[in-house]
Amino acid sequence: MARIIRDGSISRRDFFAASATAASAAALGMAAVGAGFGSAMAAEELTVNGLPAAVFGNTGLKVTRISFGGLLITEPPVLLRAIDQGINFVHTSPGYQNGRSIEAFGKAMKTHRSKVVLALKTRPDDLDRWLKVLNTDYVDMLVPPLHSTKAIADPTIPEAFEKAKAAGKVGHMGFSCHKDMTNVLNKAHELGYFEVSLMSYADAANPEFLAAVKGAVDAGMGIMTMKGLPKRGAENNTPEERARITSRCTSMVGPEHAHTVLASMGSFQAVDFYREMLETKIGYIDNALERRYWADQNGNYCSMCDKCTGTCPSGVEVRRIMRYRMYETDYGMTDYARAKYAGLDADCNAASCDQCGLCETTCKRSLPIRAMLGEAHAMLA
Ligand code: SF4
Ligand code: SF4
């Protein structure tokens, strides 16, 4: 029986033990193929560099339960600190910070490549260009953005991957997705050739989504999360906010089945927070905080689900504007958010909204879209 240390919470050791028990049947199956979430959990407190880790699906790679997301960095020191503190799984994309994130990774990889599992979000046909910037000749995982069931089933994708794998440039084939996640993940599972995925957990309260994740994990797919955490993550947060982040991380690597939480870290403070969480606090779940987190998402947070796309008679790019608003409000990326907003066609920005309210009738999160667009325009125009 797991030892309760707070209402709805359990200790880290007990969390892993309890999860191992709950996953025991699956663990036996996964152990037979030598890898996967079940087997990782069964091996209580598997560690890398002294930090809790998991076997990343059938890749067999051991990755820390919190991984480094490169969205916020423009220089290497914060990344280097995370690696030196033991976090061994890192991810970037050419799109982050207008290319400055991947350049920072490239500088860091000159000395730290052998210490990390490196994931890159870009399309296979762009790989050679970004390998040069990264100062490496291979990435462990390539996760191109594939946001629809049509995109995920594109037959040129596995061909391109196999070519890159044969050339030793990619270890494992994957995808990233933050739209229509349940259907895309189920399709990827059905196709059978994707080994890893980077999934948005903005919709992780949805049982169908969690069932899709579980199905993929049980089949051996490695899952890393994006989104699914309270805003900004770790800087200057109150004790309650810190507890909420810890609870969300624990949920994602426990009942929500992911192997690792990709956390965007933009400061030494953030690195130290996540490092300490991994070392001492992962395993903490507070059900009241979880409920409050999900309640806050409703009516407040755009999950980028894409449901409203195409509904606006005035052609306003609702989802993209919501995304740029999030860069500003959640991550404080003011210059980047403003540059992105300025890049919208003038006919598609929030000033073109005529307040008809149609988009709000389609939004499953019941967002006050008109008000949020107005706020975004005031912040970013
Ligand atoms: S409220 Fe504005 S953004 Fe929404 S559908 Fe109407 S015009 Fe488009
Ligand atoms: S505004 Fe609503 S419907 Fe549109 S992408 Fe966001 S959550 Fe989905």
Image (cartoon, helix red, strand yellow):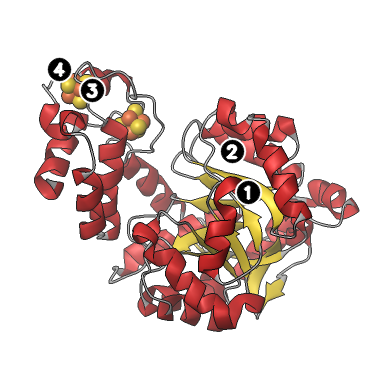
Alpha carbons under labels 1 and 3: distance apart: 38 Å
- Residue at 69% x, 46% y is 161
Alpha carbons under labels 3 and 4: distance apart: 12 Å
| Numbered circle sitting on residue 257 | 1
Disc 2 secondary structure class: helix
| Numbered circle sitting on residue 210 | 2
User: Which one is earlier in the sequence, the residue at label 3 or at label 2?
Assistant: 2
Mark 4 sits near ligand 1, with its Cβ under 8 Å away = yes
Quadrant where the image shows the N terminus: bottom right
Q: Quadrant of ligand 1?
A: top left
| Numbered circle sitting on residue 355 | none
Residue position for label 3: 315
Residue position for label 4: 356
Alpha carbons under labels 2 and 4: distance apart: 34 Å
User: Which one is earlier in the sequence, the residue at label 1 or at label 3?
Assistant: 1
Check disc 1 and give the amino acid type.
His
CB under 8 Å between discs 3 and 2: no
Mark 3 sits near ligand 1, with its Cβ under 8 Å away = yes
User: Which one is earlier in the sequence, the residue at label 2 or at label 1?
Assistant: 2
